[in-house]
Amino acid sequence: MNEIFSNPVLAKALPEAIVETLQMVGISAFFTVLIGLPLGVFLHVTVPGGLRPLPVVNRIVSDIVVNITRSIPFAILMVALIPLARLLVGTSLGPVAASVSLSIGTIPFFARLVEACLRDVHHGKIDAAQVMGSTRMQVISKVMLPESLPALVAAATTTVVTLVGYSAMAGLVGGGGLGKLAYNYGFQRFDVTVMIVTIVLIIVLVQLIQLTGEWISRSLDHR
Amino acid sequence: MITVTDLRKVYRQGKKEVVALDGVSLSVPKGSIHGIIGHSGAGKSTLVRCLTLLDRPTSGSVNIDGTELSSVRDSEIRAARRRIGMVFQHANLMDSRTAAGNVAHPMELVKAPKDKIRAKVAELLKLVGLEGFENAYPSQLSGGQRQRVGIARALASDPDVLLCDEPTSALDPATTDEILDLIQDLTRRLQLTVLIITHEMHVVKRVCGSVSLLSKGRVIESGPLAEVASDLDSKLARALLPLPASEPIKGALQAGPVLEILFSGDGAKEPVLTGVARHFDIDLNVLAGSVETLGGQQFGHLRVQLGDDADCDAVLGYLRSRGISVKLAGSIANEAELAEFAPADTDFAAETGDSK
């Protein structure tokens, strides 16, 4: 125990690393939901037989954007997107820059989860809403989203947990955070204490996210 | 008042054309309940989808109180739909909304004022007998209570027509009767025009004033309940007044003609059979029978065997002269043949089970 507190690396770099990780996860989670949710809704309603069928557009968005981005390993995508990050935020270093590639990496993932959640809304509910005289937007805002909310929260939780993992990777290419700390000190300098402490912290973080997400999802579920 | 004229719906499946509705015509006056009965695949679901404009009919018209629904432009489709309240087999309530929230849903869509919504929700929940359940979620309600919420929701947009698609098929018999009585009560009180699509003959018997039999996309029989039940040759009469299979009766007559007799109205009150026995001095043997009250009239359907020596034509004439419909169903020469008199038509014998 003493070793943890006397370790100079931990005392100096750990607080900053934690803040950086939380920044990366927070910023990219925000943008992932902001863009991934509408994208998922779009994918769901434009399928043939959907609320607003647009088969060609759906195919293009679905295949090109979502499937291709998802099939590229995140480590490669991250490096490939460094120029984009520089363009958008002016730098390729730091947690904000890393959030660009993190968001782009998880938006398609989240959009697919959203699409699956919406597909699980029973078709009879959509019929009922339409027969009542709902507009398409009302079907989305008053039926699809509220009815799938518990599932959407669970999907967001899974996405944020994935983001924590990705953020550790992002640390290696300039994002900073716990991933960088573990790699630089724990791996390259054989500092076992740093390695163990960062691993424990990441596990605790993931556990907290998971528990909070499950709790919210459960309290929203009236089924 | 809803009038459906020559409604056709043709689906395309690749190069093949599937005719789901082949010229359906119906007319239901205000304040009455019309049943549409048919097997799975008869076109019931397609009819519902065309009436609610979830699908556009290929041709034909749907007219509610003078407003033509089938030709409205897409922009007016939502206003047109609000004239029809729909009750679904599984209620299709929103799980994320309370009973009150579900009933408020159609009113929220047209941005009705909040206090108006609240007052109307309370009124409707009271009307369907769910006072005090405002804050219950659908998962906390029984199947019958959920269907009551569904009915209240269907009435929230003050529709002229209530369309019920298998409203009781997922309910137990006691709850079925409660829901049917509620629909009947509401029809009278609110002067609704009600269409009930069902595969359960029980529903037709209990609440419908008139009925149509749908088969392969066509209405093959239709009319007021008392009228279709009086026609011995109609499929609906056989389904409304089913006769069980005849078992040979020990010591019964061994041979002789078998008659099917249908009494209705006043005829059902007269002691016709004993009249025949006395008049012709013959023996009669009742093989099977059923008695029902349909559309406020008493009906009796009997399968009767006459003695070998009876003058069959004279008996037929005697019964017909008394306004009773009767026909010669066959003749039994021996016990083995008697056993072959299966129910006339088992089309609707199975009244339970899922239609879809």
Image (tube, coloured by chain):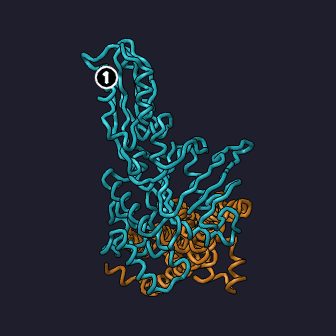
Chain B color in figure: cyan
Which quadrant of the rendered structure holds the C terminus of chain A? bottom left
Please, is residue B70 above or below residue A10 in the view? above
Residue B123 lies left or right of residue A55; in this view the side is left
Q: What's the residue at 34%, 17% (across, down)?
A: B307
Residue B162 lies left or right of residue B342; in this view the side is right
x, y percent for residue B94: 45, 68
Give the amino acid type for the residue marked by disc 1 in the picture. Answer: Leu
Name the quadrant containing residue B317.
Answer: top left
Residue B353 lies left or right of residue A118; in this view the side is left
x, y percent for residue B13: 69, 45
Is residue A204 shown to the viewer in this render?
no
Q: What's the residue at 54%, 66% (across, down)?
A: B84
Q: Which element type, helix, strand or loop, lies under badge 1?
A: strand
Is residue A39 shown to the viewer in this render?
yes
x, y percent for residue A73: 62, 62
Name the quadrant containing residue A114.
Answer: bottom right
x, y percent for residue B285: 30, 23
Q: Nearer the viewer, residue B64 or A188?
A: B64
Q: What's the residue at 70%, 82% (across, down)?
A: A86
Q: What's the residue at 68%, 80% (across, down)?
A: A85
Q: Nearer the viewer, residue A172 or A39?
A: A39
Chain A color in figure: orange
Label 1 sits on residue: B284
The chain letter under disc 1 is B
Q: Nearer the viewer, residue B185 or B276?
A: B276
